[in-house]
Amino acid sequence: MESFKLNVLGTRGSVPVEGKNFSVYGGATSCYKIHAGNEEIYLDAGSGIVSALPAPNSNITILLTHMHLDHLVGLPFFIALTQKDRPIDIYAAERAGLLPKEAIDRLISNPFWPCKIEDYPAKVKFHLLPKKFSVGDVEVDTLEGSHPKGSTIYRLTYRGKSIVHATDFEHNPEACAALADFAKDCDILLYDAQYTAAEYERYKGYGHSTPEEGIKVAEKAAVKKLVFVHHAPLRNDDELAELEKIFGREGKITFAKFGDEFLL
Ligand SMILES: [Zn+2]
Ligand SMILES: [Zn+2]
């Protein structure tokens, strides 16, 4: 039986951090690797993608939620880009009137970077995100989330099991109802819980959510496992462990840690 697997490569929101106080939950920014048969699908290309080691013959796809730097900054360092003629498919929605390649060109080009993405040895193909499509035998559904200038929520389904990735998502009644519908009965929901409820009062409109709101959505959607992601950059391991003591439930609700692996 071929596995459907999720590997956590980058948990942090906003900016990478490092040091001994961030060694458990991890300091790299958003990146989750999904393995399904011969498909390797990366959700976002934050600095977490730098530690990815793709299998030699897998099909590589990158699904971008949006173009904020914390979700993209690892892309120029993705090892597969240096592999000659390796096909890499990148999907993203149009943002700020820019097609995916046009947006990437702004970051990966002079003076920010010495070359353009087409100068790498790999064969990169960009796709404007369809509402629904498939990557090999993985079905991909999309939903536009609630975030300044937008962020795509993905649902990946393989052999009857589903993973939903809802990062850079800010709760409001309408957005939460749509997400609960979209995530209905999924096996894993990755949910943006950057703020505590108290912090959220100061950061309304920044496009992130809280554990309390994530739990409400997960309950409404009857999600099997809820994993909080996009940790605040300066929230250290002790503070995250404290939050996990309050909100965690064995096997049901956790805070993502670098190196976590979930088998479905
Ligand atoms: Zn972000
Ligand atoms: Zn963002």
Image (spheres, grey):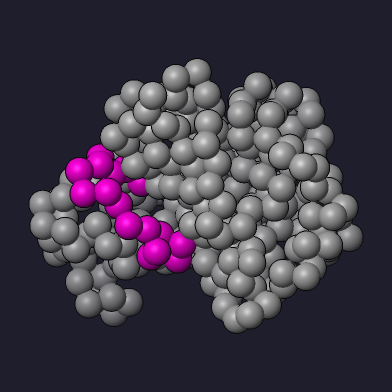
Instruction: Give the magenta part as a residue range.
Output: 47-68
| Magenta span contains residue 64 | yes
Quarter of the figure with residue 189: top right
**Total numbered badges shown on the rendered structure:** 0
Give the percent coordinates (x, y) of residue 236: 72, 72
Q: Nearer the viewer, residue 112 or 5?
A: 5
Q: Can see residue 188?
A: yes
Q: Is residue 9 left or right of residue 59?
A: right
Residue 111 vs residue 262, the one in the foreground: 262
Query: Residue, x 37% and y 58% (percent of image)?
Result: 52
Q: Nearer the viewer, residue 172 or 162?
A: 162
Q: Position of residue 201 (x, y in %)?
A: 86, 59
Task: Spot the residue most to the top.
Answer: 160
As drawn, 84 above or below 3: below
Q: What residue appears at the point 81 percent right and 35 percent down from the top-left corner?
A: 216
What x and y, as percent, mark residue 136? 30, 27
> Where does the N terminus fall, quadrant-wise?
top left
Looking at this rendering, what residue extends furthest in the front direction?
1
Res 63 seen here: no
- Is 262 left or right of 202, judged from the image as shown? left
Q: Residue at x 64, y 63 (%)?
A: 25
Name the residue rendered at 52%, 67% in the picture.
28
Please check the rendered image and state whether residue 74 is part of the magenta-colored stretch, yes or no: no
Relative image position of residue 151 (x, y in whole percent): 54, 45
